[in-house]
């Protein structure tokens, strides 16, 4: 699993592509367009693409895209 692919998949969950540069260090809640719907989409994408189920608690504890990636990697 590559962080660059994870970031691409993450960005695809937004209705409009984020205008800011998105990296592993990006605090995903600060991205314009972030919402609870996007959070659910990210959780569904992780389940579909990586066969990992993220919990709401894991989403709450993560701050950056890298944090989410590390959580998914540890469960894959």
Image (tube, rainbow, N blue to C red):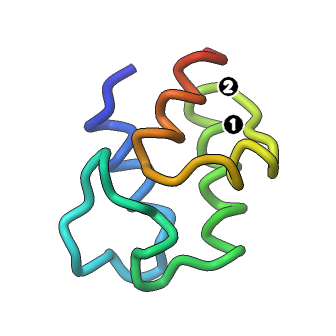
Q: Circle 2: is it few (<14), some (14-19), or many (20+) Cα within 10 Å? A: few
Residue lying at 49% horizontally and 28% vertically, measured from the top left = 70
Q: Is residue 76 left or right of residue 11?
A: right
Residue 20 x, y percent position in the rendering: 22, 75
Residue 60 on image: x %, y %: 71, 55
User: Badge 1 local density, few (<14 within 10 Å), some, or many (20+)?
Assistant: some
Q: Are marks 2 and 1 in contact (CB under 8 Å)?
A: yes
> What is the x, y in percent for residue 48?
65, 37
Name the residue at the left extreme.
21
Location of mark 2 (residue): 51
Q: Is residue 48 left or right of residue 32?
A: right
Nearer to me, 27 or 44: 27
Secondary structure of the residue carrying numbered label 2? loop
Q: Secondary structure at mark 1?
A: helix
**Residue at horizontal 32%, vertical 32%?**
3
Residue 24: percent from the left, percent from the top? 31, 45
Q: Is residue 45 above or below residue 53?
A: below
**Cα distance, mark 2 to mark 1?**
5 Å
Provide the residue designation for mark 1. 47
The quarter in which the N terminus is drawn is: top left
Where is 54 relative to 43, above or below?
A: above
Residue under the point 48% across and 84% down: 33
């Amino acid at each position: 699993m590559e962080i660059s692919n994870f970031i691409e998949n993450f960005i695809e969950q937004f209705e409009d592509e984020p205008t800011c540069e998105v990296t592993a260090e990006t605090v995903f809640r600060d991205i314009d367009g972030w919402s609870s719907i996007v959070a659910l989409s990210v959780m569904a994408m992780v389940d579909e693409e990586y066969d990992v189920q993220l919990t709401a608690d894991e989403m709450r504890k993560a701050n950056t895209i890298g944090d989410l990636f590390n959580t998914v990697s540890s469960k894959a």
